[in-house]
Amino acid sequence: MTGDIEDTKKTINDYIEWIFSHISIVVLIPSFLGAVWQILELSSINVAYIRFFSISQIPIDGTLILFLLIFLFGMSKITMALVKHSFEKKIEMFEDESLLEKTKLKLNQDIII
């Protein structure tokens, strides 16, 4: 069953290929989110300011949102890799029988005192 999971892992090249094959979605969604963000910001000042909605600002807001999404995705991947590495080191520590016995002795001595 673990062989199935290993086969479905995607590489960076798979992600890049998907982005190039769906470039219109990659451009449209951040632009739409940028427009919504702009409308919400203008309406938070006053609803009357929505008439100052700027179409030329949509690509800039979309680019900012796209950058933030890429940044958050990258940081989440880095964080997950660090957490995985940390847990692997802790598991290796508990697999060492001599270290485990020393720790048990030390804990027993601390409990008795």
Image: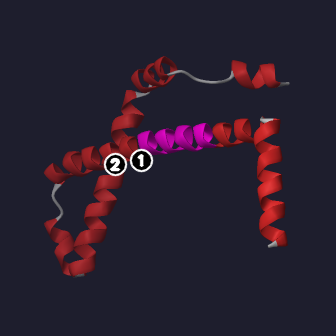
The local secondary structure at tag 1 comes to: helix
Q: Which residue in the protein does label 1 denote?
A: 72
Question: Count the marks: how many?
Answer: 2
* Residue 59 on image: x %, y %: 22, 45
Depth check: 50 or 92 in front?
A: 92
Where is residue 63 drawn, in percent x and y? Answer: 26, 44
> Mark 1 is on which residue type?
Leu
Q: Is residue 33 left or right of residue 42?
A: right
User: Which residue does the image show at 77% across and 35% down from the upper left?
Assistant: 96
- Left or right of 27? Residue 52 is left
Quadrant in which residue 47 is drawn: bottom left
Q: Vertical placement of 66 versus 24: above or below? A: below
Q: Is 62 left or right of 6, judged from the image as shown?
A: left
Quarter of the picture containing the N terminus is top right
Q: Secondary structure at mark 2?
A: helix
Q: Is residue 72 among the parts visible in the rendering?
A: yes
Q: Is the Cβ of the residue at disc 1 closer than 8 Å to that at disc 2?
A: yes
Q: What residue does disc 2 label?
A: 68
* 75 inside magenta stretch: yes
Instruction: Write down the quadrant of residue 98 in the picture.
Output: top right
Tell me the kind of residue under disc 2: Leu
Q: Look at the picture and state if 1 lies above or below 30.
A: above
Q: Residue at x 26, y 48 (%)?
A: 64
Picture quadrant where residue 36 is located: bottom left
In this picture, which residue range is highlighted in magenta?
73-86
Q: Few, some or many C-alpha atoms within 10 Å of disc 2 (few <14, some 14-19, many ≥20)?
A: few
Is residue 90 shown above or below 108? above
